[in-house]
Image (cartoon, grey):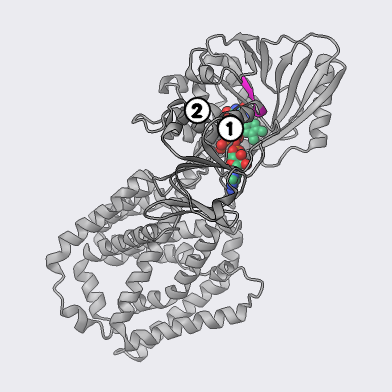
Amino acid sequence: MFSDQNHNANTIVIQYDYVFIGMGASNGLMLLELIKRGYHHTKRIAVIEKAQKNTNDKTYCFWSSPDASIVKDLSSIIRYKYQFVQTNATKVQSIQDQPYYCIRSIDFYNFLHTTIASQPIDVFESQVDGVNAHSEHIEIAFDGRSINAALVFDSRPPNFTPEANNKSYLLQTFFGYHIRLQDAIINTDTFQMMNFDVDQSNYTQFVYNLPYAPNECLVELTRFGVDTIDVNYAKKVLDDKISAQFGAYEIIAEEQGCIPMTVLKHPASSDDRIIHMGARANLIKPTTGYGFKKMYEFAASFEHKNAAQISKTRFSFYDHLLLIILIRWPHLGKKIFTALFQKNSIQAIFSFLEEKSTVSAEIKIFASLPIIPFLKACGIYFISYFKKGYLFVTGFIALFFLLQWMSPPLASQFGYTGLIAGLLIVGIPHGAVDHLLVQSKKFNLINFVVQYVLIIAAYFALWQWFPVFSLILFIAYSAYHFGESEMVEMQISLDTIPQKLYAFIIGLSILLFIIFSHLETSLLVLNSIHGVSSFIEGIDFYPYKNVVLAVSYFSILPLWWISKKTCLYLMAILVLGIQMPLMLAFGVYFVGSHSVNAWGHIATKLKTPTQKLYLQSLPFNLGALLIFAVFLYLKSANAQLIQSYAATFFVFLACVSLPHIVLMHLFYKKEA
Ligand SMILES: Cc1cc2nc3c(=O)[nH]c(=O)nc-3n(C[C@H](O)[C@H](O)[C@H](O)COP(=O)(O)OP(=O)(O)OC[C@H]3O[C@@H](n4cnc5c(N)ncnc54)[C@H](O)[C@@H]3O)c2cc1C
């Protein structure tokens, strides 16, 4: 049991080299690795764990070569080793080159307790409330006190929010009996994996059978499904199965658990000094729930140049396809896994599941599976990209260029029609659900609308009196807003000042790139805004054009290391936008990236399906169109006030976006 050894810590803030938050599988393996390397002799180490870890809450199983270091390092606690496997109804296969090993979690925890107790390691039995990065150190707060660390291993479990129209979030739930039989009839060398000879009930359900002794084994019913398994139902299925297979039995213990199966990723750590571990580092394979061996490899590669690979993109793609199938057509799971085990050697399957197979081996595996569900899943996968805007926007740009080459007036007509359609479909709606972002009990819609319109009106007035200040303000908050939504899209947290600053830099870079790549038109628009022209005319922007373009473009480059997809997409639409008119270049970014992303964030975080969200946005969509009409009327009524359509549009955008940007910022902050 972990016992708190440092009761006086609230009086002094202690500086540690390494602090472990949580002492489960991943951090336990990392701590053992550091001790193996002798780090504990020179480094000051602390462990903060909220649980006592004195129950056998799970069993860690993995397959591995008997010579591998994981087997050697953990040999004293490996409880079971299986040299043969039977999957589904196939014949028994030898796995002597890669036996299946199992460690009872209680043995692992006890091993950790004994190791920690024999070393100069401080232990706090507490729940960590916050981790704050400072320039000098990382501060870890718990129980109203804090300690500082140079490096933190954070294994707090991630919190996934499935998308509203769940495409990739499933649960692996299991319920098992540790049973004893009257007769010793079990072959302890052989375990049974994924036996689908049980009721499916429109889920993917199978049984594992891990022998512990000739008359003892763990029989576990597992479900891959959007719903968790009901315990009474599981007991009934297990009882039928065990009675049919073994006859009379006695229950020694029950085991149950749940592992999220998702390709959603917990955001990467935004500070090199905070290392995400285990499930938090996305080390659990979405489609199998295995992660223990990967966590061992991650720990073993700590500080090594060839650090363990998290997950190769193509395996994430395969996982995604399988999850799509299991969510939409759960009854197909049995057919797919049966074909997998019947037509491939267990070695090929192990290496595939471990993400160590070659592409040719993977093609062979897929060729052995029912092709239609995978083709349909591919369709859904790519359509989701299409919906996300990437393919759609790229197609739109390609068509625009083709038309421009054939007939520029037609291209222009096509482009602006597309822009208006985009604004109506997602640009305006993403701002028309602002009332849903305020989730206060005291919320009053009329007050909300009045305040919203007052802010717009006040800002409009500010534009009339202080146009230059209003312009600078607009660029500044738009830059932060665009950057903020890009950061959220890439799942980068926005806790620290440098992160917020980088969000601002990204947004500003996007804006400046679009403005400076259309400098002439941009200046024309700005010049047409009442009161801005005298300011603009005083500055010669042209000498800075190339520098601004280069700096802003390359400021986006670091995103490559966070999300290649987002970075490539952003850089592509910015470059392609150079050859489009200003309004279209901006529209492509605003609609095709910013609005689509923000709409997705709102739908996901509010757990509201798109259609419903659309309905809820309708009144404010119409409201936005009405305000726009008023601006147009003002233009005709007072040509001096706002001199052109583009300027009208610009000021309109600035005014309506202010309350929206504030609300979105508060929403992101609350939902982080
Ligand atoms: C029932 C079950 C069976 C599994 N079986 C296998 C298997 O056979 N093979 C395999 O490869 N994988 C398996 N997994 C998947 C995975 O290997 C385990 O879930 C593994 O425990 C994940 O390691 P972790 O370090 O991320 O989390 P954990 O092992 O859960 O450790 C996290 C620790 O952090 C502590 N903690 C959380 N929040 C705080 C806080 N705020 N402050 C302080 N401490 C905190 C928790 O108490 C916990 O001890 C299984 C998972 C489950 C749920």
In three-dimensional space, the C-alpha distance between marks 1 and 2, rounded to whole angstroms, equals 22 Å
Q: Is residue 104 magenta?
A: yes
Residue 289 seen by the camera = no
| Residue at image mark 2 | 296
Q: Residue furthest right?
A: 248
Which range is magenta? 102-106
Q: Residue at x 48, y 49 (%)?
A: 14
Quadrant including the N terminus: top right
Residue 520, compared with residue 132, is above or below; it is below
Does any portion of residue 239 appear in the rendered image? yes
The secondary structure type at the circle numbered 2 is helix
Amino acid type of disc 1?
Ala
Residue at image x 67%, y 39%?
52
Q: Which residue is under mark 1? A: 117
Whichever of callouts 1 and 2 sits on the residue coming sooner in the sequence is 1
Q: Nearer the viewer, mark 1 or mark 2?
A: 1
The location of residue 160, given as percent across then percent down, is: 57, 47
Ligand 1 position by quadrant: top right
